[in-house]
Amino acid sequence: MDAMKLLVIAEQKDGVLNRASWEPIAAAQTTGQPVTVAVFGSPAHAEAAAAELKAADVVEVVAVGHAALEAYTADGFTAAAVALIADLAPTHVVFAHTYQTRDYAPRVAARLDRAIATDVIAVKAGPVYVRQMFQGKVNADVVLEGPAPHFATLQIGAYRADAVVKGAGAPVRAVTAGIDPAAIRQTAE
């Protein structure tokens, strides 16, 4: 297997980590490749969630903060993700398949003109992503083509959150998101 550099995007709200965020970390760890975890939000909220995420055995946790990321907007999170991906240059970006992810992950993939596999239930060597089709009657092996990074969203419950390998405390790096608040068209209510 070629060397992969995995980026897992975790999800938080008001500094509280979404419990589904542990599942893509567990999936990424099964590859045996380096895993970096990132979380978006206001500086305080992103750092609070990162403090919890650092318990995982990962290379690094990146707290991506900006006042414009305090409330979720697809424009803000897309801009933050695109900037972070340009900075970290991962080969694969993995998300939990939440409502929030369904909204902005395809936008990130489209903005970068890259392939995405959604609602993945398993990852095989290669990587080959397994998706259910025809209301779960058939499993399809999906191999993404084209330049890196490739994107995948993992179906909730496909991996066990308690399967995350814990570490001695990953380093946490706080960065300011490189986004223009004026480019955010949505207003959170």
Image (cartoon, rainbow, N blue to C red):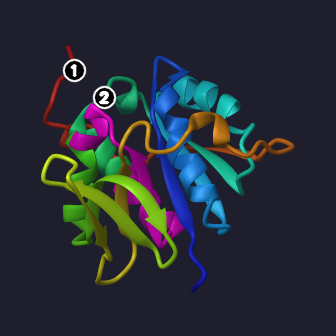
Q: Nearer the viewer, residue 54 or 189?
A: 54
Q: Residue at x 29, y 71 (%)?
A: 142
Q: Position of residue 133 (x, y in %)?
A: 18, 56
Q: Nearer the viewer, residue 10 or 129?
A: 129
Asked whether 83 falls inside the magenta stretch, the response is: yes
Q: Position of residue 44 (x, y in %)?
A: 57, 23
Q: Residue at x 26, y 70 (%)?
A: 115
Residue type highlighted by circle 2: Tyr
- Of the 4 image quadrants, the one containing the C terminus is top left
Residue at the outermost front position = 137
Q: Position of residue 7 (x, y in %)?
A: 52, 58
- Of the 4 image quadrants, the one containing the N terminus is bottom right
- Left or right relative to 4: residue 187: left
Q: Position of residue 72 (x, y in %)?
A: 31, 28
Residue type highlighted by circle 1: Ala
State which region is magenta: 81-102
Residue on which disc 1 sits: 188
Name the quadrant containing residue 141. bottom left
Q: Secondary structure at mark 2?
A: loop
Q: Residue at x 65, y 34 (%)?
A: 162
- Left or right relative to 108: residue 169: right
Asked whether 113 falls inside the magenta stretch, the response is: no
Residues marked 2 and 1 touching at CB (< 8 Å): yes
Q: Earlier in the sequence, mark 2 or mark 1?
A: 2
Give the CA separation, mark 2 to mark 1. Answer: 7 Å
Is residue 111 shown to the viewer in this render?
Answer: yes
User: Alpha-carbon neighbours of circle 2 within 10 Å: few (<14), some, or many (≥20)?
Assistant: many
User: Alpha-carbon neighbours of circle 1 within 10 Å: few (<14), some, or many (≥20)?
Assistant: few
Q: Secondary structure at mark 1?
A: loop
Residue on which disc 2 sits: 72
